[in-house]
């Protein structure tokens, strides 16, 4: 470990390549080495080699709890080389139970964990001195809870007594058993999910009746989803219409105020239309009844050369009509005589 940097050194030069298997030539296992104590390993090894730490397990459905345990095992010492043993299907089914992933899948999952330097396939259920010597293991890392299996109260008891055991912390809230419990609890959900994704009822070990039931439930769920989508779209449409209606009402109110104001200016008590109507009505009245001329016109001055107009004494008296035809004829004759004299 660098003095300025507390991050442990990784023995593998690159973290991008998968870890090798123990039976491959690229693994680091061979030179004899002296036995180390935990104190010596934590202070720094007296020889120029990494501390070889071993962690084993089933690692079924590899999850974050597994990765965290391996990270702790890798960082227990400043310079360490982490070997991970994975038990085979035969040992696991015999001592623990059936696994979801087969041994080849579990081996490959461990190879691609960044903290693992080497994978030991078909690891033993109980660690023997011969196995520890073969792989030059300095320390064994595991959580400190006694692990009872294979007729023993704690399979790591002899490792602890030899001073080769280093504990790691167990991650609460997640384990392979927890994941399997979720699947079993929601069996119908996952069966319907896989049927919908194209798996057959035979592959899922589902009966004919359950297959039809699951497919019907999938159709019902699709219809519910469609109805939900329609409801959401309807809500969005109603909200849009409501927003637009508010805008239209507001614009209508503004336009109505403007319209009422213009109407009052034009047709109100003192509006322009009333004034125009009064002006036109007064013009029409003047055109229909013009002003009368004066009753008595001034007397014209008579010309001196002209004689006054004669007095027509011959006009009959309207108040006194002739008393007899003879008198009427006499008056007519006198009128005619008078006219001749004037000529």
Image (tube, rainbow, N blue to C red):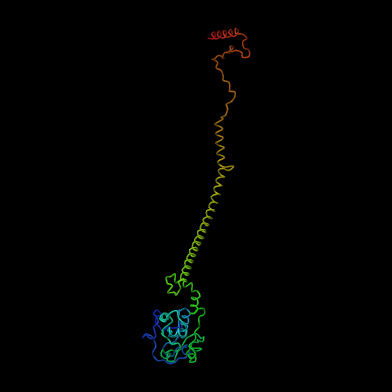
Can you say whether 260 is above or below 141 in the image? above
Q: How many marks?
A: 0
Residue 333 occupies quadrant:
top right
Task: Name the foreground residue: 281 vs 161.
Answer: 161
Q: Position of residue 250 (x, y in %)?
A: 54, 53
Image position, residue 62 (x, y; %): 45, 79
Where residue 304 sits: x, y (%)? 55, 15
Q: Is residue 58 above or below residue 226?
A: below
Would you say 267 lies left or right of 74 here? right
Q: Nearer the viewer, residue 80 or 145?
A: 145
The quarter of the picture where residue 106 lies is bottom left
Q: Look at the picture and state if 204 lies above or below 307.
A: below
**Camera-side residue: 174 or 163?**
174
User: Considering depth in this image, is 301 or 242 the residue closer to the camera?
Assistant: 242
Residue 305 falls in image quadrant: top right
The percent position of residue 286, horizontal first and vertical second, equals 56, 32
Q: Quadrant of the N terminus?
A: bottom left
């Amino acid at each position: 470990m660098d003095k300025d940097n507390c991050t442990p050194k990784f023995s593998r030069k690159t973290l991008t390549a998968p870890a090798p298997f123990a039976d491959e030539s690229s693994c680091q296992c061979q030179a004899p080495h002296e036995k180390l104590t935990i104190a010596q390993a934590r202070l720094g090894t007296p020889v120029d080699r990494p501390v070889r730490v071993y962690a084993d397990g089933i690692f079924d459905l590899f999850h974050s709890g597994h990765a965290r345990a391996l990270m702790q095992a890798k960082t227990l010492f400043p310079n360490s080389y982490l070997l991970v043993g994975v038990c085979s299907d035969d040992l696991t089914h015999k001592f623990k139970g059936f696994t979801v992933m087969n041994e080849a899948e579990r081996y490959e999952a461990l190879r691609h964990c960044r903290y693992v330097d080497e994978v030991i396939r078909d690891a033993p259920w109980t660690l023997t001195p011969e196995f520890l010597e073969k792989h030059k293991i300095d320390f064994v890392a595991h959580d400190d809870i006694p692990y009872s299996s294979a007729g023993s109260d704690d399979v790591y008891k002899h490792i602890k007594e030899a001073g080769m055991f280093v504990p790691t912390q167990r991650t609460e809230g997640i384990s392979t058993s927890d994941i399997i419990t979720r699947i079993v609890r929601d069996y119908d959900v996952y069966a319907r999910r896989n049927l919908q994704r194209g798996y057959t009822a035979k592959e899922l070990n589902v009966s004919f009746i359950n297959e039809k039931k699951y497919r019907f439930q999938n159709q019902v769920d699709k219809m519910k989803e469609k109805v939900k989508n329609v409801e959401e779209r309807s809500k969005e449409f109603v909200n849009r219409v409501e927003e637009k209606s508010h805008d239209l009402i507001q614009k209508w109110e503004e336009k109505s105020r403007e319209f009422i104001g213009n109407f009052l200016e034009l047709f109100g008590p003192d509006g322009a239309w009333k004034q125009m109507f009064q002006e036109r009505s007064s013009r029409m009245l003047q055109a229909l009844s013009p002003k009368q001329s004066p009753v008595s016109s001034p007397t014209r001055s008579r010309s001196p050369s002209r004689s006054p107009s004669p007095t027509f004494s011959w006009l009959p008296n309207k108040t006194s009509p002739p008393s007899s035809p003879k008198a009427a004829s006499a008056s007519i004759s006198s009128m005619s005589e008078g006219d001749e004299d004037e000529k």
